[in-house]
Amino acid sequence: MFPIAVLFLLQGTPAPPAIADSDSGDPPSRAARLSLLEGSVLFQPSGDTTANSWSAASINYVLSSGDRVYAEQGGRAELQVGDATLRINGVADLTVSTLADDFLQVSLAQGTLRVSVYDLAAGDSIEVDTPNGALMLRQAGAYRIDVSSEEPRTDVAVDSGLADVVTGETAQQLQRGQALELTGTAPIRVATVGFPRQDDFDRWSAERDGTLGSSQSAQYVGRDVPGYDDLDGAGGWQQEADYGPVWYPTTVIAGWAPYRFGHWVWIDPWGWTWVDDYPWGYAPFHYGRWVYLRNRWGWVPGPRPRRPCYAPALVVFVSVGRVGVQAWVPLGPREPYHPWYHYGPRYRDRVNPDIPFVPTRDVHYVNRPQLTAVPVGTFQGGEGVGRRTVRLTATDVDRVQVIAHPRLMPLTRAAVGRPAPKPPVVPRPAIEVTPWRRPPAVVPAPQPAVRPAVRPVKPTTPVRRVPPVIAQNPPAPQALPFPTRQKAMQGDPGRPLEPQQRENVREGKPAGPHHDAEEPPDRRPAVAPPKKKP
């Protein structure tokens, strides 16, 4: 029997992490990658709650604060976030409540979640919120959380690591080999239960962790770069005198080039974001640079900073002088990346490790001859690029001009995807923030009898009623609905709104002009506001 005790912490629980508002300062330096999908898995972007905002999830898609993943019966999904991996087993409803540089917060409304934490740096925090309480992960380890869809019950088990289970007025520390059952709502009852036996989902998750741990590519990329393990079976590494370790893909088709076989999507706060078709196509398109050597492409991961910084696509956009065509060029080694979204000097330096940040006019752009061009409808509609490329002459290529960003308004398909045929009818769960409070008096907790753990029974169809999720820390604000953002960008199509513009729109005001300087400067004449009808 594991004793259970109410922890009366005289100094309180550890202070909540400093969470920067997602609408201020730099964008987050990390994102969550959808790295594996089985069965039917749906996605709903932050801020959009209509039935039409549900779409089929896709490999390599990027998730940030407020995004939601729903695995239907028989479905599974895996999310990679730096030094942690989250896996859900259907029917499961998971929301990425907050994804900041040092804080990951997810909400599990129903279903099963396994969290594998490979390293938890000092100052970093991971919080899992459920309808019966919040789980604060304190150490690297493996954790399982089951939320019943039929009754107010959450089961928590710690295979390894250390966690605090916080339910409002009680905080129970849970160690390796221990399990708890949380039931009820007001009050929430906490009971020790026997450690559950492994099932197929546990074994599958452990096998996935083993693949990550044995990856050879980790020595060249770093284990906090999502997708490093997928490089092992899709290419090989060579040491190049001028660039260090270079990875060469071996599973690509003829005519392949970086940023050519995939599609563009619109994800705030970054705006235009590349989603690659190849299963291994995540790390090489959001980190490092590409080089064309001996008639083949190689990926140069570059230096390994302590905290690698995510980029939506390491390219430079260009104008080819043709109406109705948009083009881009993969950045080469030591070529600076100029973000097309709001950022500050700290972010600029982190996303360009050991690379001087110079004006675009001073950069040669070695990969310019291998640019990719498509019709603007393909680009702004989030359609596949590979079969829609536009052939350019050598003269066209010589005359291309670098631009700050594509001046194209994203269509709904690029931001939300194609609507799912049968979207779930489960509304987003409300999040109630109930930080831990010291009880008014010290009363010893009873010692409940240990009883075997019972796995939640998952329904075959979604449940309409969704109980609120209890959180210890407030989640990041939801994004503005895409139609609202789309309307606010009319004055400068294809340029993400800056923090102050988003705040203005939230307050019911006009977005107002951009204030960040662009590189290269936008020399178009100012767009006059539409005249009001008399």
Image (cartoon, grey):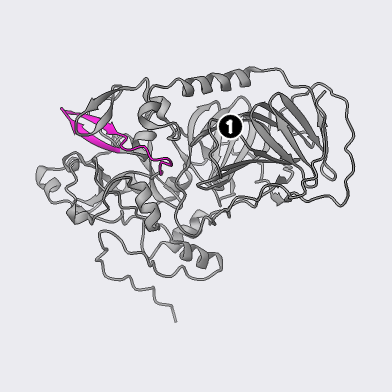
Residue at the farthest bottom position: 534
Residue pictured at 36% horizontal, 56% vertical? 494
The image quadrant that residue 405 belongs to is bottom left
Q: Is residue 456 visible?
A: no
Look at mark 1 in the image and give the residue it sits on.
140
Q: Element at badge 1?
A: loop
Q: Magenta residues, as a range?
A: 289-309
Along the viewing direction, whichever of 144 and 449 lies nearer the viewer: 449
Would you place residue 212 above or below residue 416 in this image? Answer: above
Q: Label 1: few (<14), some or many (≥20) within 10 Å?
A: some
Along the viewing direction, whichever of 390 and 337 lies nearer the viewer: 337
The image quadrant that residue 459 belongs to is top right
Is 163 inside the magenta-drawn segment? Answer: no
33 left or right of 529 in image:
right
Count of residue discs: 1
State the quadrant of the N terminus: top right
Residue 170 at x, y percent in the picture: 79, 43
Residue pictured at 14% horizontal, 46% vertical? 397
Q: Amino acid at mark 1?
A: Ala
Q: Is residue 316 visible?
A: yes
Would you place residue 94 above or below residue 348 in this image? Answer: above
Residue at the farthest left position: 395
306 left or right of 77 in image:
left
Would you place residue 312 above or below residue 208 in this image? Answer: below
Residue 207 at x, y percent in the picture: 54, 18
Along the viewing direction, whichever of 446 and 483 lies nearer the viewer: 446
Residue pictured at 37% horizontal, 40% vertical? 286
Residue 258 at x, y percent in the picture: 28, 35
State the quadrant of the C terminus: bottom left
